[in-house]
Image (tube, helix red, strand yellow):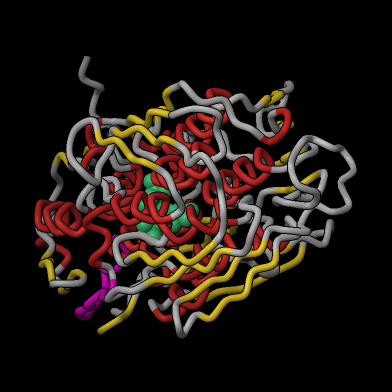
Amino acid sequence: MTEALWKAPTAVGPLDARVRVPGSKSLSNRYLILAAMGRRPVRIGGLLRSRDTDLMIGALRELGVTCHEGEDPTRVMIIPPAGGVFRGGGTVTCGLAGTVMRFVPALAMLADGPTRFDGDLQAYARPMAPLLSGLEQLGARVEYLSREGRLPFIIHPPQRLGGGEVTIDSSASSQFISGLLLLASRLGAPVTIHHQGENLPSLPHIRMTVHDLTLAGVRVEVDEEAHSWMVDGTGASEDVDEPDGRPDGVGPQLPDTVQVEPDLSNAAPFLGAALIASGRVGIPDWPESTTQPGGLLPSYLTRMGGEVAFTRDDRGHTCLTVTGSGKVCPLGGFDLSQAGEIVPSIAAILVFADGPSRLRGIGHLRGHETNRLKALVTEINRVGGRAREMADGIEIEPVPPDRLHPAVMKTYADHRMATFAAMLGLAIPGVQVEDIGTTAKTLPDFPDMWADMVATGD
Ligand SMILES: O=C(O)C1=C[C@@H](OP(=O)(O)O)[C@@H](O)[C@H](O)C1
Ligand SMILES: C=C(OP(=O)(O)O)C(=O)O
Protein backbone atom coordinates (compact mmCIF):
# COMPACT_ATOMS: atom_id res chain seq x y z
CA MET A 1 0.00 0.00 0.00
CA THR A 2 1.41 3.42 -0.84
CA GLU A 3 0.86 6.05 1.78
CA ALA A 4 -0.74 9.32 0.64
CA LEU A 5 1.60 12.27 0.19
CA TRP A 6 1.65 14.65 3.15
CA LYS A 7 1.11 18.31 2.34
CA ALA A 8 3.66 20.23 4.36
CA PRO A 9 1.90 23.21 5.97
CA THR A 10 3.27 26.62 5.01
CA ALA A 11 3.62 29.36 7.62
CA VAL A 12 1.57 32.40 6.72
CA GLY A 13 2.71 34.60 9.59
CA PRO A 14 5.18 34.66 12.51
CA LEU A 15 4.84 31.65 14.78
CA ASP A 16 3.99 31.82 18.46
CA ALA A 17 4.12 28.25 19.71
CA ARG A 18 5.07 26.17 22.73
CA VAL A 19 5.90 22.59 21.83
CA ARG A 20 6.33 19.84 24.39
CA VAL A 21 8.62 17.16 22.95
CA PRO A 22 8.60 13.57 24.27
CA GLY A 23 11.54 11.76 25.89
CA SER A 24 15.02 11.40 24.44
CA LYS A 25 15.55 8.32 22.28
CA SER A 26 19.19 8.04 23.33
CA LEU A 27 18.50 8.32 27.06
CA SER A 28 15.44 6.04 26.88
CA ASN A 29 17.34 3.24 25.19
CA ARG A 30 20.38 3.59 27.47
CA TYR A 31 18.21 3.45 30.61
CA LEU A 32 16.37 0.40 29.25
CA ILE A 33 19.64 -1.47 28.65
CA LEU A 34 21.23 -0.43 31.95
CA ALA A 35 18.08 -1.31 33.90
CA ALA A 36 18.07 -4.75 32.26
CA MET A 37 21.73 -5.30 33.24
CA GLY A 38 21.10 -4.50 36.94
CA ARG A 39 19.92 -6.64 39.84
CA ARG A 40 16.85 -4.79 41.09
CA PRO A 41 13.81 -3.47 39.22
CA VAL A 42 14.04 0.07 37.88
CA ARG A 43 11.13 2.39 37.08
CA ILE A 44 11.68 4.64 34.08
CA GLY A 45 9.54 7.75 33.67
CA GLY A 46 9.21 10.03 30.64
CA LEU A 47 10.21 7.14 28.34
CA LEU A 48 9.94 7.88 24.63
CA ARG A 49 7.36 5.62 22.97
CA SER A 50 8.25 5.30 19.32
CA ARG A 51 9.45 2.65 16.92
CA ASP A 52 13.06 2.72 18.23
CA THR A 53 12.11 2.37 21.91
CA ASP A 54 9.43 -0.24 21.17
CA LEU A 55 12.08 -2.24 19.31
CA MET A 56 14.34 -1.95 22.36
CA ILE A 57 11.56 -3.17 24.68
CA GLY A 58 10.86 -6.02 22.25
CA ALA A 59 14.56 -6.94 22.25
CA LEU A 60 14.70 -6.97 26.06
CA ARG A 61 11.64 -9.21 26.27
CA GLU A 62 13.15 -11.57 23.70
CA LEU A 63 16.19 -11.85 25.99
CA GLY A 64 14.11 -12.69 29.06
CA VAL A 65 13.73 -9.25 30.64
CA THR A 66 10.34 -8.37 32.16
CA CYS A 67 8.96 -4.98 31.09
CA HIS A 68 5.81 -3.89 32.94
CA GLU A 69 3.77 -1.24 31.21
CA GLY A 70 0.92 0.53 32.97
CA GLU A 71 -1.77 2.86 31.71
CA ASP A 72 0.76 5.60 30.99
CA PRO A 73 3.01 4.11 28.31
CA THR A 74 5.83 6.53 29.18
CA ARG A 75 6.25 4.81 32.57
CA VAL A 76 7.67 1.30 32.60
CA MET A 77 9.22 -1.02 35.15
CA ILE A 78 12.16 -3.16 34.05
CA ILE A 79 12.92 -6.37 35.94
CA PRO A 80 16.27 -7.99 35.08
CA PRO A 81 16.40 -11.74 34.42
CA ALA A 82 17.24 -14.06 37.33
CA GLY A 83 20.96 -14.37 37.96
CA GLY A 84 21.64 -11.64 35.40
CA VAL A 85 21.67 -14.25 32.65
CA PHE A 86 19.80 -13.33 29.47
CA ARG A 87 17.83 -15.90 27.47
CA GLY A 88 19.58 -16.93 24.29
CA GLY A 89 18.14 -18.80 21.34
CA GLY A 90 15.92 -16.00 20.02
CA THR A 91 16.00 -13.27 17.40
CA VAL A 92 16.38 -9.59 18.13
CA THR A 93 14.61 -7.38 15.59
CA CYS A 94 16.55 -4.14 15.22
CA GLY A 95 14.41 -2.34 12.64
CA LEU A 96 16.58 0.58 11.57
CA ALA A 97 17.54 1.56 15.12
CA GLY A 98 21.26 2.15 15.65
CA THR A 99 20.82 2.01 19.42
CA VAL A 100 19.22 -1.45 19.20
CA MET A 101 21.70 -2.97 16.73
CA ARG A 102 24.76 -1.51 18.55
CA PHE A 103 23.69 -1.76 22.23
CA VAL A 104 21.70 -5.01 22.49
CA PRO A 105 24.69 -7.19 21.43
CA ALA A 106 26.03 -6.37 24.93
CA LEU A 107 23.14 -8.36 26.40
CA ALA A 108 23.65 -11.18 23.90
CA MET A 109 27.20 -11.54 25.29
CA LEU A 110 25.63 -12.24 28.70
CA ALA A 111 23.09 -14.77 27.38
CA ASP A 112 22.92 -18.53 27.89
CA GLY A 113 22.91 -19.25 24.15
CA PRO A 114 23.36 -17.64 20.73
CA THR A 115 21.19 -14.68 19.67
CA ARG A 116 20.29 -13.81 16.10
CA PHE A 117 20.11 -10.13 15.08
CA ASP A 118 18.11 -8.97 12.09
CA GLY A 119 16.56 -5.72 10.91
CA ASP A 120 15.07 -3.70 8.06
CA LEU A 121 16.65 -4.21 4.63
CA GLN A 122 18.02 -0.67 4.89
CA ALA A 123 19.68 -1.63 8.18
CA TYR A 124 21.84 -4.16 6.31
CA ALA A 125 23.78 -1.17 4.91
CA ARG A 126 24.62 0.30 8.32
CA PRO A 127 28.15 -0.30 9.64
CA MET A 128 28.48 -2.91 12.41
CA ALA A 129 31.94 -4.48 11.95
CA PRO A 130 33.95 -2.49 14.54
CA LEU A 131 31.49 -3.32 17.32
CA LEU A 132 31.46 -7.00 16.39
CA SER A 133 35.25 -7.03 16.25
CA GLY A 134 35.20 -5.62 19.80
CA LEU A 135 32.93 -8.46 20.91
CA GLU A 136 35.26 -10.98 19.24
CA GLN A 137 38.20 -9.46 21.11
CA LEU A 138 36.20 -10.20 24.29
CA GLY A 139 35.70 -13.83 23.28
CA ALA A 140 32.48 -13.93 21.22
CA ARG A 141 32.06 -15.75 17.91
CA VAL A 142 30.09 -13.87 15.29
CA GLU A 143 28.39 -15.82 12.52
CA TYR A 144 27.42 -13.70 9.54
CA LEU A 145 24.23 -14.75 7.75
CA SER A 146 24.74 -12.58 4.69
CA ARG A 147 27.60 -10.07 4.21
CA GLU A 148 30.56 -10.03 6.58
CA GLY A 149 30.44 -7.11 9.00
CA ARG A 150 26.70 -6.44 8.47
CA LEU A 151 23.32 -7.51 9.73
CA PRO A 152 21.95 -10.18 9.93
CA PHE A 153 24.30 -12.15 12.20
CA ILE A 154 24.35 -14.48 15.20
CA ILE A 155 26.32 -13.71 18.34
CA HIS A 156 27.66 -16.79 20.11
CA PRO A 157 28.60 -15.62 23.61
CA PRO A 158 31.98 -16.59 25.09
CA GLN A 159 32.24 -19.55 27.51
CA ARG A 160 33.92 -17.28 30.02
CA LEU A 161 33.68 -13.53 30.25
CA GLY A 162 36.64 -11.45 31.28
CA GLY A 163 38.22 -8.03 31.06
CA GLY A 164 41.19 -6.81 29.08
CA GLU A 165 41.96 -4.42 26.25
CA VAL A 166 39.80 -3.82 23.19
CA THR A 167 40.83 -1.69 20.22
CA ILE A 168 38.41 -0.67 17.47
CA ASP A 169 37.99 2.05 14.85
CA SER A 170 34.86 3.97 15.82
CA SER A 171 35.07 6.56 13.01
CA ALA A 172 31.82 5.35 11.46
CA SER A 173 29.73 5.64 14.64
CA SER A 174 30.14 6.56 18.28
CA GLN A 175 27.63 3.83 19.06
CA PHE A 176 30.36 1.17 18.77
CA ILE A 177 32.22 2.69 21.73
CA SER A 178 28.95 3.18 23.64
CA GLY A 179 27.90 -0.44 23.04
CA LEU A 180 31.24 -1.74 24.33
CA LEU A 181 31.17 0.59 27.35
CA LEU A 182 27.75 -0.75 28.32
CA LEU A 183 28.93 -4.35 28.00
CA ALA A 184 32.20 -3.67 29.85
CA SER A 185 30.25 -2.62 32.95
CA ARG A 186 29.00 -6.19 33.39
CA LEU A 187 32.30 -8.02 32.92
CA GLY A 188 33.92 -9.29 36.09
CA ALA A 189 37.17 -7.36 35.55
CA PRO A 190 38.18 -3.91 34.26
CA VAL A 191 38.13 -3.39 30.50
CA THR A 192 39.94 -0.65 28.56
CA ILE A 193 38.47 0.34 25.22
CA HIS A 194 40.65 2.18 22.71
CA HIS A 195 39.56 4.00 19.57
CA GLN A 196 42.14 4.03 16.80
CA GLY A 197 40.98 5.79 13.68
CA GLU A 198 40.66 9.01 11.77
CA ASN A 199 37.59 10.55 13.44
CA LEU A 200 35.50 10.05 16.50
CA PRO A 201 32.01 11.45 15.88
CA SER A 202 29.28 12.29 18.39
CA LEU A 203 31.45 12.68 21.49
CA PRO A 204 28.46 13.97 23.51
CA HIS A 205 26.75 10.61 22.98
CA ILE A 206 29.82 8.78 24.34
CA ARG A 207 29.86 11.18 27.31
CA MET A 208 26.16 10.40 27.79
CA THR A 209 27.00 6.68 28.06
CA VAL A 210 29.79 7.41 30.56
CA HIS A 211 27.44 9.67 32.54
CA ASP A 212 24.70 7.04 32.67
CA LEU A 213 27.17 4.30 33.68
CA THR A 214 28.41 6.55 36.48
CA LEU A 215 24.80 7.09 37.57
CA ALA A 216 24.60 3.28 37.76
CA GLY A 217 27.63 3.13 40.09
CA VAL A 218 30.19 2.06 37.47
CA ARG A 219 33.68 3.55 37.57
CA VAL A 220 34.83 4.91 34.21
CA GLU A 221 38.19 6.60 33.64
CA VAL A 222 38.19 8.62 30.45
CA ASP A 223 41.11 9.98 28.46
CA GLU A 224 39.44 11.68 25.50
CA GLU A 225 42.74 12.88 24.08
CA ALA A 226 44.12 9.35 24.00
CA HIS A 227 40.69 8.03 22.95
CA SER A 228 40.55 5.47 25.74
CA TRP A 229 37.96 4.49 28.33
CA MET A 230 38.59 2.21 31.28
CA VAL A 231 35.43 0.66 32.71
CA ASP A 232 35.34 -1.08 36.06
CA GLY A 233 31.94 -2.50 36.92
CA THR A 234 33.17 -4.49 39.90
CA GLY A 235 31.76 -3.01 43.08
CA ALA A 236 29.13 -1.03 41.18
CA SER A 237 26.13 -2.73 42.76
CA GLU A 238 27.61 -3.52 46.17
CA ASP A 239 24.71 -1.99 48.08
CA VAL A 240 22.27 -4.38 46.42
CA ASP A 241 21.69 -7.34 48.63
CA GLU A 242 19.73 -9.67 46.34
CA PRO A 243 22.13 -12.61 45.85
CA ASP A 244 21.70 -13.85 42.29
CA GLY A 245 24.62 -16.09 41.55
CA ARG A 246 26.75 -13.26 40.15
CA PRO A 247 29.97 -12.26 41.87
CA ASP A 248 29.11 -9.64 44.49
CA GLY A 249 28.84 -6.10 43.29
CA VAL A 250 29.49 -6.72 39.59
CA GLY A 251 27.38 -4.72 37.15
CA PRO A 252 25.52 -1.46 36.85
CA GLN A 253 22.59 -0.61 39.07
CA LEU A 254 20.54 2.46 38.15
CA PRO A 255 18.65 4.25 40.94
CA ASP A 256 15.18 2.77 41.62
CA THR A 257 13.57 5.53 39.53
CA VAL A 258 15.01 7.48 36.61
CA GLN A 259 13.40 10.22 34.54
CA VAL A 260 14.14 10.73 30.83
CA GLU A 261 14.80 14.29 29.59
CA PRO A 262 12.88 15.61 26.57
CA ASP A 263 14.51 14.77 23.23
CA LEU A 264 16.46 17.90 22.35
CA SER A 265 17.35 16.63 18.87
CA ASN A 266 13.66 16.25 18.15
CA ALA A 267 13.19 19.83 19.39
CA ALA A 268 15.51 21.02 16.58
CA PRO A 269 12.95 21.13 13.72
CA PHE A 270 10.51 23.11 15.90
CA LEU A 271 13.14 25.58 17.11
CA GLY A 272 14.47 25.92 13.57
CA ALA A 273 10.96 26.75 12.41
CA ALA A 274 11.18 30.04 14.33
CA LEU A 275 14.17 31.01 12.18
CA ILE A 276 12.63 29.91 8.88
CA ALA A 277 9.09 31.25 9.42
CA SER A 278 9.98 34.03 11.94
CA GLY A 279 8.24 34.37 15.29
CA ARG A 280 8.92 32.36 18.42
CA VAL A 281 8.88 28.73 19.49
CA GLY A 282 9.34 27.61 23.09
CA ILE A 283 10.30 24.15 24.35
CA PRO A 284 9.26 23.58 27.98
CA ASP A 285 11.33 21.45 30.38
CA TRP A 286 14.62 22.24 28.66
CA PRO A 287 17.18 20.62 31.00
CA GLU A 288 19.52 22.85 33.04
CA SER A 289 22.42 20.68 31.99
CA THR A 290 22.45 17.75 29.62
CA THR A 291 24.64 15.25 27.85
CA GLN A 292 22.40 15.35 24.76
CA PRO A 293 24.03 16.90 21.67
CA GLY A 294 20.86 18.99 21.33
CA GLY A 295 22.28 20.96 24.26
CA LEU A 296 24.42 22.68 21.60
CA LEU A 297 21.32 24.00 19.81
CA PRO A 298 21.00 27.32 21.67
CA SER A 299 24.50 28.35 20.56
CA TYR A 300 24.01 27.08 16.98
CA LEU A 301 20.66 28.86 16.64
CA THR A 302 22.15 32.09 17.99
CA ARG A 303 24.89 31.92 15.34
CA MET A 304 22.23 31.53 12.68
CA GLY A 305 20.49 34.73 13.82
CA GLY A 306 18.02 33.44 16.41
CA GLU A 307 17.44 35.14 19.72
CA VAL A 308 17.57 32.63 22.54
CA ALA A 309 15.95 33.07 25.96
CA PHE A 310 15.67 30.77 28.97
CA THR A 311 12.72 31.47 31.24
CA ARG A 312 11.39 29.67 34.32
CA ASP A 313 7.77 28.62 34.76
CA ASP A 314 5.98 28.52 38.12
CA ARG A 315 7.18 24.92 38.70
CA GLY A 316 10.75 26.17 38.41
CA HIS A 317 11.22 24.37 35.08
CA THR A 318 13.18 26.04 32.30
CA CYS A 319 11.65 26.86 28.93
CA LEU A 320 13.92 27.58 25.96
CA THR A 321 12.41 30.10 23.54
CA VAL A 322 13.93 30.90 20.17
CA THR A 323 12.80 33.97 18.25
CA GLY A 324 13.57 34.49 14.58
CA SER A 325 13.37 37.72 12.56
CA GLY A 326 13.08 36.00 9.18
CA LYS A 327 16.75 36.63 8.42
CA VAL A 328 19.02 33.56 8.63
CA CYS A 329 22.81 33.93 8.95
CA PRO A 330 25.08 31.34 7.31
CA LEU A 331 27.48 29.26 9.39
CA GLY A 332 30.49 29.49 7.03
CA GLY A 333 32.85 26.56 7.65
CA PHE A 334 31.38 24.73 10.63
CA ASP A 335 32.29 21.46 12.34
CA LEU A 336 29.20 19.49 13.29
CA SER A 337 30.97 16.24 14.20
CA GLN A 338 29.66 16.46 17.77
CA ALA A 339 26.02 16.62 16.79
CA GLY A 340 25.54 14.68 13.55
CA GLU A 341 21.95 13.78 14.26
CA ILE A 342 20.82 17.42 14.13
CA VAL A 343 22.50 18.11 10.79
CA PRO A 344 19.29 17.67 8.74
CA SER A 345 17.55 20.36 10.84
CA ILE A 346 20.54 22.71 10.62
CA ALA A 347 20.74 22.13 6.85
CA ALA A 348 17.04 23.00 6.42
CA ILE A 349 17.56 26.34 8.17
CA LEU A 350 20.67 27.09 6.07
CA VAL A 351 18.76 26.67 2.79
CA PHE A 352 17.27 30.09 3.69
CA ALA A 353 20.55 31.72 4.82
CA ASP A 354 21.99 34.73 3.01
CA GLY A 355 25.46 33.25 2.61
CA PRO A 356 27.23 29.90 2.14
CA SER A 357 27.82 27.23 4.79
CA ARG A 358 30.13 24.23 4.71
CA LEU A 359 29.12 21.66 7.33
CA ARG A 360 32.15 19.47 8.10
CA GLY A 361 33.12 16.47 10.22
CA ILE A 362 29.99 14.55 9.27
CA GLY A 363 31.17 11.98 6.72
CA HIS A 364 29.74 9.28 9.01
CA LEU A 365 26.22 10.48 8.15
CA ARG A 366 26.60 8.31 5.01
CA GLY A 367 25.99 5.36 7.38
CA HIS A 368 22.96 6.76 9.19
CA GLU A 369 19.37 5.66 8.44
CA THR A 370 20.20 6.48 4.82
CA ASN A 371 23.19 8.16 3.18
CA ARG A 372 22.15 11.50 4.67
CA LEU A 373 24.73 13.61 2.83
CA LYS A 374 23.50 12.36 -0.52
CA ALA A 375 19.86 12.61 0.54
CA LEU A 376 20.21 16.19 1.82
CA VAL A 377 21.99 17.36 -1.32
CA THR A 378 19.43 15.64 -3.57
CA GLU A 379 16.44 17.09 -1.74
CA ILE A 380 17.86 20.63 -1.45
CA ASN A 381 18.56 20.66 -5.19
CA ARG A 382 15.12 19.16 -5.87
CA VAL A 383 13.39 22.30 -4.53
CA GLY A 384 15.73 24.65 -6.41
CA GLY A 385 18.31 25.19 -3.65
CA ARG A 386 22.03 24.73 -4.20
CA ALA A 387 24.01 22.09 -2.30
CA ARG A 388 26.86 19.70 -2.97
CA GLU A 389 28.57 16.85 -1.18
CA MET A 390 32.09 17.29 0.19
CA ALA A 391 34.37 14.48 1.38
CA ASP A 392 33.31 14.95 5.00
CA GLY A 393 30.16 17.04 4.76
CA ILE A 394 27.97 19.25 2.60
CA GLU A 395 28.08 22.77 1.24
CA ILE A 396 24.90 24.84 1.01
CA GLU A 397 24.87 28.04 -1.02
CA PRO A 398 22.25 30.77 -0.98
CA VAL A 399 19.77 31.14 -3.84
CA PRO A 400 17.25 33.95 -4.42
CA PRO A 401 13.98 32.98 -2.68
CA ASP A 402 12.08 32.99 -6.00
CA ARG A 403 14.28 30.14 -7.25
CA LEU A 404 12.87 27.80 -4.61
CA HIS A 405 9.89 25.83 -5.87
CA PRO A 406 7.59 23.09 -4.61
CA ALA A 407 8.32 19.40 -5.20
CA VAL A 408 7.42 15.96 -3.92
CA MET A 409 10.22 15.31 -1.43
CA LYS A 410 11.59 11.85 -0.67
CA THR A 411 12.32 10.70 2.88
CA TYR A 412 14.36 7.48 2.41
CA ALA A 413 12.79 5.75 5.48
CA ASP A 414 14.62 8.41 7.50
CA HIS A 415 12.69 10.28 10.21
CA ARG A 416 15.06 13.23 10.06
CA MET A 417 14.74 13.57 6.26
CA ALA A 418 10.97 13.78 6.84
CA THR A 419 11.24 16.56 9.43
CA PHE A 420 13.80 18.27 7.17
CA ALA A 421 11.25 18.28 4.32
CA ALA A 422 8.57 19.69 6.64
CA MET A 423 10.94 22.53 7.57
CA LEU A 424 11.48 23.46 3.92
CA GLY A 425 7.71 23.37 3.41
CA LEU A 426 7.29 26.18 5.95
CA ALA A 427 8.66 28.67 3.43
CA ILE A 428 8.15 26.86 0.10
CA PRO A 429 4.40 26.62 -0.51
CA GLY A 430 3.24 23.39 -2.11
CA VAL A 431 5.91 20.98 -0.79
CA GLN A 432 4.59 17.43 -0.44
CA VAL A 433 6.35 14.70 1.51
CA GLU A 434 6.51 10.96 0.85
CA ASP A 435 6.04 8.63 3.84
CA ILE A 436 5.70 11.17 6.65
CA GLY A 437 4.94 8.10 8.80
CA THR A 438 8.67 7.41 8.94
CA THR A 439 8.82 10.03 11.73
CA ALA A 440 7.42 7.25 13.98
CA LYS A 441 11.04 6.11 14.44
CA THR A 442 11.41 8.71 17.18
CA LEU A 443 8.39 11.06 17.05
CA PRO A 444 5.10 9.35 16.11
CA ASP A 445 3.01 12.49 16.71
CA PHE A 446 5.11 14.66 14.44
CA PRO A 447 2.47 15.52 11.78
CA ASP A 448 -0.05 16.77 14.38
CA MET A 449 2.56 18.54 16.49
CA TRP A 450 3.85 20.29 13.37
CA ALA A 451 0.39 21.31 12.15
CA ASP A 452 -0.44 22.72 15.60
CA MET A 453 2.76 24.73 15.64
CA VAL A 454 2.27 26.13 12.14
CA ALA A 455 -1.36 27.04 12.93
CA THR A 456 -0.11 29.55 15.53
CA GLY A 457 1.12 31.65 12.59
CA ASP A 458 -2.34 31.90 10.98
O1 LIG B 1 24.33 6.82 21.03
C1 LIG B 1 23.33 7.34 20.56
O2 LIG B 1 22.24 7.35 21.17
C2 LIG B 1 23.42 8.00 19.25
C3 LIG B 1 24.65 8.30 18.73
C4 LIG B 1 24.83 8.99 17.43
O3 LIG B 1 25.24 7.99 16.50
P1 LIG B 1 26.49 8.20 15.47
O4 LIG B 1 27.72 8.39 16.28
O5 LIG B 1 26.46 6.96 14.66
O6 LIG B 1 26.16 9.43 14.67
C5 LIG B 1 23.54 9.64 16.96
O7 LIG B 1 23.66 10.10 15.64
C6 LIG B 1 22.37 8.67 17.09
O8 LIG B 1 21.19 9.28 16.64
C7 LIG B 1 22.16 8.31 18.54
C1 LIG C 1 21.35 8.45 13.48
C2 LIG C 1 20.18 8.34 14.11
O1 LIG C 1 19.66 7.20 14.65
P1 LIG C 1 20.24 5.80 15.11
O2 LIG C 1 20.05 5.74 16.59
O3 LIG C 1 19.39 4.80 14.40
O4 LIG C 1 21.68 5.74 14.71
C3 LIG C 1 19.29 9.51 14.29
O5 LIG C 1 18.30 9.37 15.04
O6 LIG C 1 19.54 10.59 13.70
In this rendering, the answer to whether 27 lies above or below 96 is below
Q: Residue furthest toward the top?
A: 1
Q: Is residue 13 visible?
A: no
**Residue 295 lies in quadrant:** bottom right
Using the image as rendered, state which of residue 69 and residue 348 is in the foreground.
Answer: 69
Tell me residue 308's x, y (percent): 55, 74
Question: Would residue 431 appear left or right of 309 to someone viewing this image?
Answer: left
Q: Is residue 417 visible?
A: yes
Identify which residue is drawn at 43% across, 29% down.
115
Identify which residue is drawn at 51% across, 45% down.
106
Tell me residue 78's x, y (percent): 71, 32
Q: Residue furthest toward the front?
A: 159
Region in magenta: 348-361
**Residue 286 lies in quadrant:** bottom right
Question: Would residue 440 appear left or right of 236 to someone viewing this image?
Answer: left
Please say whether residue 450 is one of the residues in the magenta stretch: no
Q: The N terminus is located in which quarter? A: top left
Using the image as rendered, state which of residue 292 and residue 330 is in the foreground.
Answer: 292
Q: What is the count of numbered marks?
A: 0
Tell me residue 243's x, y (percent): 84, 37
Tell me residue 189's x, y (percent): 64, 59
Question: Would residue 178 appear left or right of 371 to someone viewing this image?
Answer: right
Identify which residue is drawn at 55% across, 33% down.
111
In this rendering, the answer to whether 312 lies above or below 416 is below
Identify which residue is drawn at 46% across, 21% down.
90
In this rendering, the answer to whether 79 lies above or below 369 is above
Using the image as rendered, state which of residue 19 and residue 94 is in the foreground.
Answer: 94
Please say whether residue 359 is one of the residues in the magenta stretch: yes
Using the image as rendered, state which of residue 8 and residue 257 is in the foreground.
Answer: 257
In this rendering, the answer to whether 45 lies above or below 139 is above
